[in-house]
């Protein structure tokens, strides 16, 4: 039985001999610093079809790969900024996907760095390459 660090209302049960269980070790501080250093080079997702893009984002969320979460966040952040300039907003679906990606990334980084999830964004911004 597993219990998420930041959601004590959830319990995950999986057999110990289940090789199909999507589990991996938590990211290390060195891996986090390497990811932060490469964030400016991570390319946003360039799919115009909204349905295909949402499906691609959902699939990326399920991979458990922090690089994919960063790609989603970066793409939707840039979209949100562009839409805001013309008084538009992200769709509810896009907003939900972005929030999920941010939550997963912040909670994993927070656990690995022994800080709160609220401290993750300032931590990243302090270490972003100029």
Image (cartoon, rainbow, N blue to C red):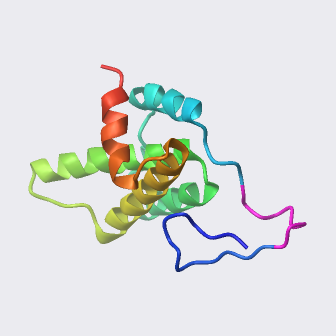
Task: Note whether 67 is above or below 41 in the view shown.
Answer: below
Q: Residue at x 47, y 55 (%)?
A: 107
Q: Position of residue 57 (x, y in %)?
A: 49, 57
- Left or right of 56? Residue 116 is left
- Left or right of 48? Residue 27 is right
Q: Specify the farthest residue to the front.
A: 114
Please state which of residues 66 and 45 is positioned toward the viewer in this rendering: 66
The mark tally for this picture is 0
> Which region shows up in magenta?
15-23
* Residue 74 shows up from this direction: yes
Q: Position of residue 81 (x, y in %)?
A: 20, 47
Task: Note whether 42 is above or below 49 in the view shown.
Answer: above
- Left or right of 21? Residue 26 is left
Query: Can residue 5 be found in the magenta stretch?
Result: no
The N terminus, quarter of image: bottom right
Q: Specify the farthest residue to the right.
A: 17
Quarter holding residue 89:
bottom left
Q: Position of residue 23 (x, y in %)?
A: 72, 58
Please state which of residues 6 and 45 is positioned toward the viewer in this rendering: 6
Q: Residue at x 68, y 69 (%)?
A: 2
Query: Can residue 19 be found in the magenta stretch?
Result: yes
């Amino acid at each position: 039985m597993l219990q998420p660090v930041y959601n004590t209302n959830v319990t995950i049960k999986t057999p110990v001999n289940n090789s199909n269980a999507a589990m991996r070790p938590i990211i290390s501080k060195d891996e986090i610093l390497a990811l932060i250093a490469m964030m400016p080079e991570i390319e946003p997702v360039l799919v115009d079809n909204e349905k295909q893009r949402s499906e691609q984002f959902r699939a990326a969320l399920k991979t458990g790969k922090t690089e994919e979460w960063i790609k989603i966040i970066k793409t939707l952040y840039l979209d949100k900024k562009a839409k805001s300039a013309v008084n538009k907003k992200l769709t509810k679906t896009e907003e939900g996907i972005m929030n999920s990606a941010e939550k997963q990334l912040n909670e994993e980084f927070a656990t690995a760095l022994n800080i709160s999830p609220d401290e993750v964004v300032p931590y990243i911004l302090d270490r972003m390459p100029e």
